Image (cartoon, grey):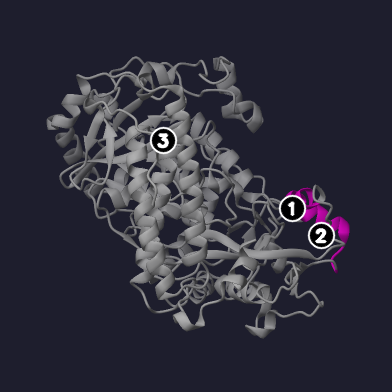
C-alpha cells in the first residue's frame, strides 16, 4: 500500500511509547486545565457565561445553540494533585457514560470527569436511537415478565448469550428505567415518553418481542433520552464535563490502568488524565467502520473503545458479531438512513419489485424474525435487482396517514425532503451496519482484564447480545451496566480497595511525576498548515479504504478468502494510520487509526470463527456472490 507522501518531523520529546509498541502518544501539555476550561470557545469566540451554563443544565437551549458554547468552567487546581486525581474518568457521554457518571456522583458522592469528543454531551450515538427502550408491560393480559424478556433475548442472540447478563438486564431493567429516566423530582432524568390518552405510558411492539414493552418518544427516543440524561449530568455539582476531548490511549502502569491520554480537538493540546477511582470506556461501537452504516456519516462510531483496549492489550470478545439492520433507506449516493424496527412492529411489510411479500420465504415470523435473519433475507433479495431497478421495499401504506406522520415524524421529514411519503410510497431498503454485539470483555460489574479499567454500553461485551441483539436492548444495557459499574466502584469493598491501590500507584508513578513537571505547546506549533491539511486529507482517504474493505469482505456474508484479504489490507492501512497519527495527531488521524485497529480486530475474530451463528455468517468460497452481485448491494 502506498505510504503518505507527506513527511512530518517528530519531536522526540513528544512521544510516549507503550510497552506493546503499538501505540504512541505525546507526554504533551499537562497544563490544559486553564486553557480547556476557559469559558471562551476557541472556535467561535462566544463566551459561555454562567447564564449560558445554566440554560444548558435546565434545557433552555437548543442543541444548535449549545454547540457554540464551551462548558468548561475555570479550575485553578493542579491537574495532577492528589485531589484532582481522586475522581472517576468516564469516556463517552451517551446513555452508558451518563448513567455511570450520575450514579457515581449522586449515590456515592464521587467526583466524576466526563470526557467526550463532541461540542455538546448529547453529541453521541445514543442520540440517534429511533425505536425505544425496553421497559415492562405490567398489564397481566400481556404475559410480559422478566422471564419472557429473557427468553426473547436468548432467542435473538442465537443461543450465544451469557445468561447472567440476560437475567441482570431482564430483572433490573425496569427499576433502572424508573430510577434514571422516570424521576420527576430527583437528581436524575424525567423523560417525557409517549403516553396513552389515559395517561399511562405507551408501550409498543417490536420484532422478536413476545409483548409490547417498548417505551418511546415518537421515532426519536434516543434524542429525548440523551437530552435529559446529559442535562442531569451537567447539572450535578460533582460531574465535570470536558468536551472536544479525544481519548487516544489508555495509560497503564504494568497491570493497572491509571488514566487516559487525550487530545483537545480545538486547541491541539495533549494531556494525561489520571484517575484513582477508575476509568470507564463508554464511547460506543464500531458500525461506522463500514461503508454502509446507520450511524451518522463522518468520524463517528469508529470503534475507539475496542481500539483503545486492543492497543493496551485488554481482552475483547465476540467482535465478529456486528449487527446489520435490515432496513436502512436505499437512496443511491446518499448515506444510509435508519428505518426503525418499530415500523415493522407497527405492521410494515417487505415486498419485492413486483409487490410480492417475501419475508416468510426465509422465516415463519417474516418481518418480525430476529434481525440477522431479516437482514440476510433483505440482502439476498436485493441481489435480484436488475437493470438498476431496486428490488426490496418496506410498505406501511395500509396504515392511516395522520397516525403515521405523528408516530414517525423524524422519518417522515427525512422522506419528504426526498419526495417520499411513507403513507403513499413503498420505501426502498437495504441492510446497513448498525451495532456491535461484542466489544471489550467485561464481567457483570463492568470490569475488564486490566485492573482499574471498566467498560459499559456498546463498548462492552457483557454477553447480553450473544450473536445478535434484540431490538431496543441497547439503551437499556447502557443504563443497567453503566449503573452497575458505579455501584461496584463506589458501593463495594473490593471497588474501594481497588481505588486505594490505584491512588497508591499514582503517587509513586514515574509517568505521573514526569508529566507534572513537563509542559509542551500544542502539537501544531511545529507543523506547517499544509502538512496538517495533507495529513487530514490522507486520513479521510484511509478511512474510505477501511470502510470499503469492511463492507466487501467482513459484511453480512463472509468467506475465508475474503477475510484473509481483509486482514492483509487492514494491516497495511493500520500501519500507515499509526504512523500518520504519530506525526500529526488530529481528529481525523485519530479516527482512522482507531477504525483500522478495530476493523482488523473484527476481521481477525471473524477469520478465527468458522461457525456461522447470529450476525456472523460464513460460507465457503465457492458460494461467494459474484463481484457484480456485491456491487448491486454496495451502491
Left or right position of 507 against 388: left
Which residue is more in the foreground, 58 or 259? 259
Graded by Cα atoms within 10 Å as few (under 14), some (14 to 19) or many (20 or more), the crowding at tag 1 reads many
The residue beneath circle 3 is: 246
Write the start and end of the magenta stretch as one range.
Answer: 398-415
Q: Residue at x 48, y 83 (%)?
A: 622
Which residue is more in the foreground, 386 or 244? 386
In contact (CB < 8 Å): disc 2 and disc 3:
no
Q: Residue at x 39, y 71 (%)?
A: 163
The residue beneath circle 1 is: 411
**Which circle marks residue 281 in the picture?**
none
Q: Is residue 175 visible?
A: no
Q: Residue at x 87, y 56 (%)?
A: 402
In contact (CB < 8 Å): disc 1 and disc 2:
yes
| C-alpha separation, residue under disc 1 versus residue under disc 2 | 9 Å
* Between discs 3 and 1, the one toward the N terminus: 3
Residue 619 locus on image (x, y percent): 47, 80
Left or right position of 93 against 347: left
The residue beneath circle 2 is: 422
Amino acid at each position: 500500500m502506498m505510504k503518505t507522501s507527506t513527511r512530518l518531523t517528530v519531536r522526540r520529546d513528544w512521544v510516549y511509547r507503550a510497552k506493546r509498541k503499538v501505540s504512541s502518544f505525546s507526554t504533551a501539555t499537562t497544563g490544559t486545565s486553564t486553557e480547556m476550561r476557559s469559558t471562551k470557545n476557541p472556535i467561535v469566540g462566544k463566551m459561555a457565561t454562567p447564564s449560558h451554563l445554566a440554560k444548558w443544565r435546565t434545557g433552555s437551549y437548543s442543541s444548535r445553540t449549545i454547540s457554540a458554547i464551551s462548558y468548561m468552567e475555570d479550575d485553578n487546581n493542579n491537574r495532577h494533585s492528589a485531589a484532582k486525581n481522586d475522581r472517576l474518568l468516564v469516556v463517552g457521554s451517551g446513555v452508558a457514560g451518563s448513567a455511570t457518571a450520575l450514579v457515581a456522583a449522586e449515590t456515592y458522592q464521587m467526583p466524576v470527569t466526563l470526557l467526550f469528543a463532541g461540542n455538546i454531551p448529547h453529541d453521541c450515538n445514543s442520540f440517534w436511537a429511533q425505536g425505544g427502550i425496553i421497559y415492562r408491560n405490567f398489564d397481566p393480559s400481556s404475559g410480559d415478565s422478566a422471564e419472557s424478556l429473557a427468553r426473547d433475548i436468548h432467542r435473538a442472540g442465537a443461543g450465544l448469550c451469557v445468561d447472567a447478563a440476560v437475567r441482570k438486564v431482564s430483572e433490573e431493567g425496569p427499576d433502572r428505567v424508573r430510577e434514571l429516566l422516570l424521576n420527576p423530582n430527583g437528581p436524575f432524568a424525567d423523560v417525557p415518553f409517549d403516553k396513552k390518552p389515559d395517561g399511562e405510558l405507551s408501550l409498543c411492539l417490536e420484532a422478536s418481542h413476545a409483548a409490547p414493552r417498548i417505551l418511546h418518544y415518537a421515532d426519536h427516543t434516543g434524542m429525548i433520552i440523551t437530552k435529559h440524561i446529559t442535562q442531569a449530568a451537567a447539572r450535578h455539582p460533582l460531574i465535570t464535563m470536558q468536551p472536544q476531548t479525544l481519548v487516544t490511549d489508555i495509560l497503564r502502569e504494568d497491570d493497572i490502568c491509571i488514566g487516559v491520554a487525550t487530545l483537545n480537538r480545538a486547541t491541539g493540546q495533549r494531556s494525561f488524565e489520571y484517575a484513582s477511582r477508575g476509568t470507564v470506556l463508554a464511547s460506543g461501537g464500531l458500525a461506522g467502520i463500514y461503508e454502509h452504516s446507520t450511524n451518522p456519516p463522518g468520524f463517528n462510531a469508529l470503534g475507539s473503545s475496542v481500539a483503545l483496549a486492543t492497543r493496551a492489550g485488554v481482552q475483547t470478545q465476540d467482535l465478529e458479531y456486528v449487527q446489520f439492520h435490515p432496513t436502512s433507506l436505499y437512496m443511491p449516493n446518499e448515506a444510509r438512513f435508519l428505518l426503525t424496527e418499530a415500523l415493522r412492529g407497527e405492521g410494515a411489510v417487505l415486498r419485492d419489485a413486483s409487490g410480492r411479500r417475501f419475508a416468510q420465504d426465509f422465516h415463519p415470523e417474516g418481518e418480525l424474525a430476529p434481525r440477522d435473519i431479516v437482514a440476510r433475507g433483505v440482502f439476498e433479495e436485493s441481489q435480484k435487482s436488475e437493470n438498476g431497478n431496486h428490488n426490496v421495499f418496506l410498505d406501511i401504506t395500509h396504515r392511516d396517514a395522520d397516525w403515521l406522520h405523528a408516530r414517525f415524524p423524524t422519518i417522515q421529514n427525512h422522506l419528504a425532503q426526498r419526495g417520499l411519503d411513507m403513507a403513499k410510497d413503498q420505501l426502498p431498503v437495504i441492510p446497513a451496519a448498525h451495532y456491535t454485539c461484542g466489544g471489550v470483555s467485561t464481567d457483570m460489574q463492568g470490569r475488564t482484564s486490566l485492573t482499574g479499567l471498566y467498560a459499559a454500553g456498546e463498548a462492552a461485551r457483557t454477553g447480553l447480545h450473544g450473536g445478535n441483539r434484540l431490538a431496543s436492548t441497547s439503551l437499556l444495557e447502557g443504563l443497567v451496566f453503566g449503573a452497575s459499574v458505579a455501584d461496584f466502584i463506589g458501593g463495594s469493598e473490593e471497588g474501594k480497595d481497588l481505588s486505594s491501590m490505584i491512588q497508591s500507584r499514582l503517587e509513586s508513578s514515574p509517568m505521573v511525576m514526569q508529566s507534572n513537571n513537563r509542559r509542551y505547546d500544542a502539537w501544531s506549533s511545529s507543523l506547517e498548515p499544509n502538512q496538517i491539511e495533507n495529513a487530514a486529507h490522507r486520513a479521510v482517504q484511509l478511512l474510505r479504504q477501511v470502510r470499503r474493505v469492511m463492507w466487501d469482505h467482513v459484511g453480512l456474508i463472509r468467506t475465508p478468502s475474503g477475510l484473509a484479504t481483509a486482514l492483509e489490507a487492514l494491516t497495511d492501512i493500520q500501519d500507515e494510520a499509526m504512523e500518520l497519527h504519530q506525526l500529526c495527531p488530529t481528529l481525523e488521524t485519530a479516527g482512522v487509526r482507531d477504525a483500522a485497529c478495530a476493523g482488523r480486530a473484527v476481521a481477525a475474530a471473524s477469520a478465527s470463527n468458522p461457525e456461522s451463528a447470529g450476525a456472523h455468517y460464513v460460507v465457503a468460497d465457492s458460494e461467494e456472490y459474484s463481484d457484480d452481485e456485491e456491487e448491486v448491494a454496495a451502491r
